[in-house]
Amino acid sequence: MTRRSPRASWAVAAVLATIGAARLATDLLTDADPAWSQRLAGSPLRYLVRAPSDGTLAGDLNVQWFKVLAIPCCVAGLWLIKRVLSSDLRATERLWRSRAYRVAFLLLFAAMCLVAEFEKSTHFLGLRMAGLLAGERSWLNHVAHAVSLALGAWLMGWLSFVGPLTTGATRGVPASPPRRSRGRSP
């Protein structure tokens, strides 16, 4: 897979992390008060928050298929944290490209989604989550998270901390002349 420019990675990661953080906040609000989203009824904003389906295609997509962004949003958040806290981007890039590192985080994110879906449908942990909303099907949630896992794996390969290895000359900037040695010339 071709490495992308760090600027493109910043942009994509920032957008996805913002979407993920906003959706997580509305999920937590729904868990605290399942009726809070009623205030947004009739507004296009209702399709951006976790709310029961209103029977429209947009409502069904919101309640059931917004989950395909769950793991990509987690990956984007992880990338941003690593990017901001890294003191050596090349070492961070090597770690990010490590298969074991990628698999470990993808499995962690998938496990978080799995536990959340089981908790919503069975309440086996007693976390007082809102449960399944109108129009939401438990088995389709798992399908959506499987798609999310595949998208997250692709995104982990796409995001880059350092750009493609190029020289100044290949980008239209003349290469620096070689440095002269300080000793005697031969």
Image (tube, rainbow, N blue to C red):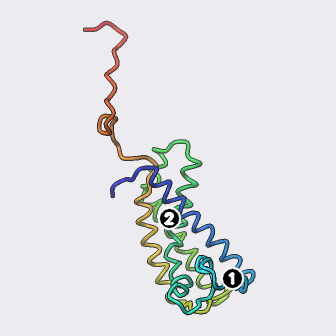
- Give the residue furthest to the front: 42
Above or below for 148 versus 166: below
Nearer to us in this view, 53 or 116: 53
Circle 1 crowding by C-alpha within 10 Å: few under 14, some 14–19, many from 20: some
At numbered mark 2, what does the secondary structure look like: helix, strand or loop?
helix
Nearer to us in this view, 141 or 22: 22
Determine the CA span between mark 2 and mark 1: 35 Å
Residue to which mark 2 is pinned: 104
Which circle's residue, 2 or 1, is located before the other in the chain? 1
**Residue 106 location (% of width, % of height):** 49, 67
Q: Quadrant of residue 118?
A: bottom right
Above or below for 13 versus 111: above
Circle 2 crowding by C-alpha within 10 Å: few under 14, some 14–19, many from 20: few
Residue to which mark 1 is pinned: 37
Taking the spot 66% from the left edge, 75% from the top edge, the residue there is 26
**Residue 9 location (% of width, % of height):** 46, 55
Query: Could one spot residue 127 in this view of the protein?
Result: no
**Residue 75 location (% of width, % of height):** 51, 63
Taking the spot 53% from the left edge, 90% from the top edge, the residue there is 56
Look at label 1 and name its amino acid: Ser
